[in-house]
C-alpha cells in the first residue's frame, strides 16, 4: 500500500473490505432470484453445523407481528418460503457455518 500514514491505510482497508462484502452480497441476491416472483418455488434445503440452530429473520413485535424464524432440526432445514431462502443466503454465516444443499 502506498500509504505512509497507518490511519489512512486502515481506512482504505476498511472501505475495500466493505465494498467487497457489498459486491458479494449483491451477487448472492442476484443468484437468489426475485422473492416476489414465485411464492411457492421448489423447496431448498440448508445445512448448518449446529444441530438446533435458530436464525431470527424478523423479530416478533409484542401484540402484533409474530416475526419470522428459521429453525434447524438435526442441522437441516427444508423450506419453500422465498423470504427465508433469501434471508439465509444473505446471512453472514452463509458459506461458513450455513450452506445450501444443491442437486448435482
Image: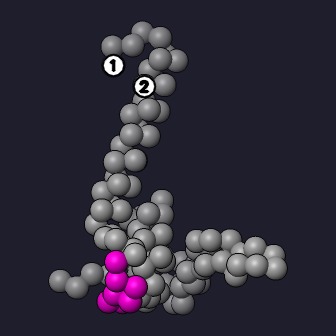
Residue 98 visible within the image? no
Q: Is residue 26 left or right of residue 103?
A: right
Prevailing SS of the magenta stretch:
loop
| Left or right: where 65 falls relative to 37 | right
- Tag 2 residue: 12
**Percent coordinates x, y for residue 88 in the rendering:** 46, 71
Instruction: Tell me the quadrant of the picture where the N terminus can be found.
Output: top left
x, y percent for residue 91: 48, 64
Q: Nearer the viewer, residue 62 or 88?
A: 62
| Tags 1 and 2 touching, CB below 8 Å | yes
What segment is highlighted magenta in the picture? 37-44
Corner quadrant of residue 15: top left
Q: Residue at x 32, y 89 (%)?
A: 42
At horizontal 82% and vertical 79% (from top left) the residue drawn is: 63
Query: Residue at position x 34%, y 87% from top?
Result: 41
Label placed on residue 73:
none
Which SS class for mark 2?
A: helix
Q: Is residue 92 visible?
A: yes
Q: Is residue 92 above or below residue 18?
A: below
Crowding around mark 1 (Cα neighbors within 10 Å: few <14, some 14 to 19, many 20+) is few
What residue do we see at 34% from left, 48% from top?
23
Please identify the residue farthest to the left as the structure is shown: 104
Q: Which one is earlier in the sequence, the residue at label 1 or at label 2?
A: 1
Q: Give the farthest residue toward the right.
A: 63
Q: Is residue 92 magenta-colored?
A: no
CA gap between label 1 and label 2 equals: 9 Å
Q: Nearer the viewer, residue 84 or 2?
A: 84
Numbered tag placed on residue 1 in the rendering = 1
Amino acid at each position: 500500500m502506498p500509504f505512509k500514514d497507518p490511519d489512512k491505510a486502515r481506512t482504505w482497508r476498511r472501505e475495500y473490505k466493505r465494498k467487497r462484502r457489498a459486491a458479494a452480497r449483491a451477487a448472492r441476491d442476484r443468484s437468489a432470484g426475485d422473492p416476489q416472483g414465485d411464492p411457492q418455488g421448489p423447496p431448498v434445503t440448508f445445512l448448518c453445523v449446529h444441530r438446533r440452530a435458530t436464525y431470527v429473520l424478523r423479530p416478533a413485535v409484542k401484540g402484533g407481528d409474530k416475526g419470522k424464524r428459521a429453525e434447524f432440526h438435526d442441522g437441516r432445514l427444508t423450506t419453500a418460503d422465498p423470504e427465508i431462502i433469501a434471508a439465509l443466503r444473505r446471512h453472514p454465516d452463509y458459506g461458513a457455518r450455513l450452506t445450501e444443499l444443491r442437486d448435482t
